[in-house]
Amino acid sequence: MATTPNKPAAAGKPVAGKQSKQGFVYLPLIAGWLVPGAGHFLLGKWIRGTLLAVSIIAMFVLGLAMQGKLYTSAQDILDMLGMAGDLGNGLLFFISRMLGLGAQPVETTVADYGTKFIVVAGLLNIIAAVDAHNLRTGRKSS
Amino acid sequence: MIHPSHFTAVLLFSLFASIVFGITMRDTPRRMFRYGAYCFILFVGSAIVLSWVMFLIAR
């Protein structure tokens, strides 16, 4: 597909709209990590934020519903990578851990898919949070 | 607890990942939609092709 990548803004000159002029520059990044879509909500991107939130939360919940596992310890390299992905879910991960969800061992193929759904939801949430940060700094124009 | 078929899992995964890719990788709604649809077709298409390849290898 012949689509050009996003154009970067001139160095040090944010070009995003009125929403990016005030406040802590990393707030959309942190908020977007903690709550899927919140970074875009802070910037007034309501539709994008809603689509991101629905997609990421649905993927996380489906992963748990498929009896996927939440990584709780990092004993080898694969566990560490899985936990890094899970941590990308922000508060969803911590709340689920507190509620004891995703603690059962993986015994079926579908449960393994569920584990991957949870990890990928976290990675997608990090991408979404970085996108909100890029909108905030003007690296992404709109 | 839900137990979707493998193909349903592929469709769900592709749908959600494509939505996020479309929104984050492009900067206008039209291009977001086109890129999201492109990613979705590639996800599902590659899963079908690889499934057939593995089926034929396993025979």
Image (cartoon, rainbow, N blue to C red):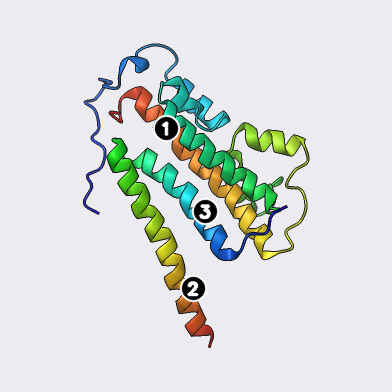
Pointer 3 and pointer 1 on the same chain: no
Tell me the SS state at disc 1.
Answer: helix
Residue B24 position, x and y percent, is 38, 39
- The answer to whether B8 appears left or right of B17 in the picture is right
Q: Amino acid at mark 2?
A: Ser
Q: CA distance from mark 1 to mark 2?
A: 33 Å
The residue under the point 59% across, 54% down is A116
Q: Position of residue A61 (x, y in %)?
A: 64, 44
Q: Residues at badges 3 and 1 in contact (C-beta under 8 Å)? A: no
**Mark pair 3, 1: CA separation:** 19 Å
Q: Residue at x 40, y 33 (%)?
A: A131
Q: Are marks 1 and 2 in contact (CB under 8 Å)?
A: no
Query: What amino acid type should be assigned to the residue bearing mark 3?
Result: Phe
Q: Residues within 10 Å of mark 3 (few under 14, many from 20)?
A: many
Name the residue nearer the viewer: A140 or A83.
A140
Q: Residue at x 71, y 64 (%)?
A: A108
Residue A35, quarter of the rendered image: top right
Q: Position of residue B29 (x, y in %)?
A: 31, 36
For label 2, the SS is: helix
Label 3 SS: helix
User: Dot 1: within a 10 Å radius of its alpha carbon, few (fewer than 14), some, or many (20 or more) residues?
Assistant: some
Circle 3 chain: B
Q: Residues under labels 3 and 2: Cα distance?
A: 16 Å
Q: Which residue is mark 1?
A: A48
Q: Which residue is mark 3?
A: B13
Subunit bearing disc 1 = A
Q: Earlier in the sequence, mark 3 or mark 2?
A: 3
Q: Is residue B41 left or right of residue A84?
A: left
Residue bearing the label numbered 2: B51
Q: Residue furthest bottom?
A: B59
| Both labels 1 and 2 in a single chain | no
